Amino acid sequence: MQMTEEPRVVNIYTESNPNPNSLKFVVNFMLMPEGVSRDFPTIESANEAPLAKALFETFDFVTGVFYMSNFITVTKKEEIDWFEVKAKVQQFIKDFLTDGKEILTEEITDNIDEELTGSDAEAKIKGVLEEYIKPAVEMDGGAIKLASYKDGIVTVTLQGSCSGCPSSTITLKNGIENLLKRMVPEVKEVVAEEG
C-alpha cells in the first residue's frame, strides 16, 4: 500500500501597509525562521528563491519580493492597481505553496547565518530592535535589520514594503531614532541603507 502525502492546507490573507505599491501576503504557517528575512529587489537577485523568481517571471508588474516570518511582501509597478492583480498574485502564491515547493533553494537555506553579537551598546540596540521596532515594522510588511553600529551611529537596513516607502524616513527619524536614543544613550543618530 502506497501512502500519498496530503497536500498542505494553505490560507492566505492580505494586509496593506504604508507603501501603496507593496502588499503583504500572510500565510497560515512560518515560511522563514524567526528573525530571518530575505529581500529580492530584482529577478537576478532571486536565483536562489524559486517563488520570488516565479513571481517576477509570471507577473511583469512585480518589482520586488520580500520573505519574512509568515509573510511575503510583493512590490508592484506604480501604474498597476492592486485591485486588478491582487487575487491573481494571491492565488499564484497559494498554488505554489500548496504544491509543497520550496521558497528558497537548499544552498541558501544552508547559508542562513546567525546574527553576530557585538559590543554592549550593540547588544542593547539589537534588543530594542527585536522587542519594540521589528514587530511594528513587520506588521507593515517590512523588516529592519541592524547593519552596523559605530561611534554612536546606528545603520539599519530597511527591506520589504519599507524599502522605498515615502513615510519610512519620517518613521526612521521620528520613531526609531527617538526610541533608540532614549533606551540606549550611546546612540547619536540612526541612518538607513537600502536593503
Image (spheres, rainbow, N blue to C red):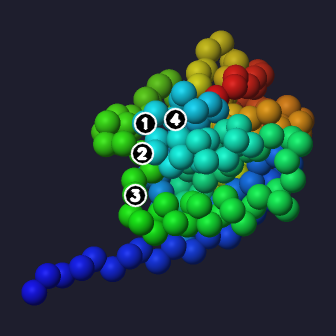
Q: CA distance from mark 1 to mark 2?
A: 6 Å
At label 1, counting other C-alpha atoms closer than 10 Å, the crowd grade (few under 14, some 14-19, many 20 or more) is some
Label 4 close to label 2 by CB (< 8 Å):
no
The mark nearer the N terminus, 3 or 1, is 1
Q: CA distance from mark 1 to mark 4?
A: 5 Å
Element type where label 4 sits in the image: helix
Label 1 close to label 2 by CB (< 8 Å):
yes
Q: Is residue 10 above or below residue 74?
A: below
Q: Is residue 107 left or right of residue 23?
A: left
At label 2, counting other C-alpha atoms closer than 10 Å, the crowd grade (few under 14, some 14-19, many 20 or more) is many
Q: Is residue 189 above or below residue 110?
A: above
- Residue wearing tag 1: 48
Label 3 close to label 4 by CB (< 8 Å):
no
Q: CA distance from mark 4 to mark 2?
A: 9 Å
Q: Is residue 62 above or below residue 169?
A: below
Residue displayed at 41% across by 66% down: 99
Q: Amino acid at mark 3?
A: Lys
Q: Give how far across and how far down residue 97 sits, in percent.
A: 47, 63
Q: CA distance from mark 3 to mark 1?
A: 13 Å
Question: Disc number at residue 88?
Answer: none
- Residue wearing tag 3: 101
At label 3, counting other C-alpha atoms closer than 10 Å, the crowd grade (few under 14, some 14-19, many 20 or more) is few
